[in-house]
Amino acid sequence: MATTRRAFIQAVGRAGGYGAAYLMMQSLGMMPSYASTGPLDLPKGSGKGVKVVILGAGMAGLAAADELLKAGYEVTILEARDRVGGHNWTVRNRDKIEWTDGSVQTCSYDDGQYFNTGPARIPSHHQAFLGYCREFGIEMEVEVNVSRSAYLRNANALGGKPVQYRQAINDTRGRVSELLGKAVSRGALDQELSPADKERMLSFLRQYGDLDPDLFYKGSKRSGYKVLPGAADQKGIAVDPLDMHGLLDLDMWNNVVFEDMIDDQATMLQPVGGMDRIPKAIAKKLGASVFRMMSEVTEIRRSASGARIVYRDRHTGKSHEITADYCICTIPLPVLAKIPSDFSEPIRSRIGDVYYGNAVKIGFESRRFWEQDFQVYGGISFTKDPGAQIWHPSGGFHSARGITVYYIYMGGEAVTGLPMAQQHVYAQKEIDALYPGRGKELGKPVVVNWGKIPYNLGNKAYLTEGDTLYDVMNKADGPFYFANDWLTHSGWQEGAIGSARHTVAAIDKRRREAKA
């Protein structure tokens, strides 16, 4: 007798437990598998005699080189900067930050402090990236993505008063549960629920929303205390609950539920000592002979046998060229659009039109007042306008000083258009609105405006749904191939690695077919 997939999964679960059932559901396509593509494991020596030039030493370029070298390809990486990592950039004491407008900053943090100006966290299901961490023995620690003690603030709601994250979440749950409980009690869902289900639903809502027996939400200790419980007769008194009107005015639902997004769910991780430990470890493995640093690409051309790349040595100002059978380009689109190339028309005509986000991060060093005065250990606080995040460090708890980061993920013209010194002041005022009186303690600001960082000119490409450029650039354009995080559906550094492996697999398949 035929059996259903559901019955089959139930049988697997009875025999092997939840884990076996989960894996079987993944294999049948019933649940997503979040483990990224592992190393390609191409036959050793299979690429012998084949030359590949990689443009850019970001995570995509480094991962592509790693896979190619293991298979015996001859690889050269051209990198315009004096560092590897691309968007993965950690700033420390004495580092220089240069903008395209000529502005120059020199970081003066205390030794041991650091600022992840680009990627700053790793979801636990990003196993390609974490695989490199395992391979190189890089120590990891928990990145506290969410602290219920952190704050949300909409300047135009609740008198501009910050609301603790725990209160926004639990008061919303309570108010919505009360409304749903009333609807169930009044028969509004009788067509969807049986009498028995109605009783079970009401029981659930009392627990889920912390409602009283009559289904009213009168506040919850889950939302925090205005008087903490203590010794003897000091009973805890919960904060006064926010009404539904005030919660709707807050209008920050994306921030309220952000920890539910798959890429933001615990457990999040970070390398101890800075995110750039990963690209530096990969580069060390590849070897110095693979790299031509301070080499700015000025032309990308086809040749009779493959690709011809012209580049300028930034030390000497002299031009050189290199030829290869294949070229993997990881250069950010705003930069690539300005380089003369022999790309096909569907690519060349479009790469300058893609919207590239202009994230801004400002890292301040100060006393750890968020911990000492407000009991916020890690996590992110949010402001509504201009949609900024305030990141609190996830390491060094109870040390004297730390780096807090004011971060605008996209846009934020109200900040990005200001002179650098005024950006400092703006960010200080925003942080002070969350932590009154503490903005003046913020010092040693470092501003990384990705739209003004040479050889990036932004932080990420954003394609509209169904944009044909995605498919076009995921295929070969003669001798040219492309790899970057935005050429995947996963994004992040995980996407950069996945894109690189996809591209290397395509090159190797083409080489084998040509040889056959």
Image (cartoon, rainbow, N blue to C red):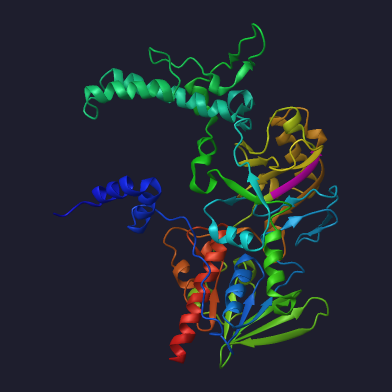
The reply to whether residue 423 is in sight is: yes
Name the foreground residue: 212 vs 78: 212
Q: Is residue 252 above or below residue 421?
A: above
Q: Residue 60, percent across and down?
A: 60, 67
Please say whether residue 363 is one of the residues in the magenta stretch. yes
Please state the extent of the stretch shown in magenta in the rendering. Answer: 361-366
Image quadrant assignment for residue 395: top right
359 sits left or right of 372 in the view? left
On-image quarter of the C terminus:
bottom left
The reply to whether residue 461 is in sight is: no
Q: Is residue 476 above or below residue 493?
A: below
Residue found farthest to the top: 233
x 84%, y 48%: residue: 109
294 sits left or right of 169 in the view? right
* Numbered circles on residues, count: 0
Image quadrant assignment for residue 156: top right
On-image quarter of the N terminus:
bottom left
Name the foreground residue: 472 vs 346: 472
Q: Residue 112, percent across and down?
A: 81, 49
Q: Residue 401, percent across and down?
A: 81, 39
x 37%, y 24%: residue: 204
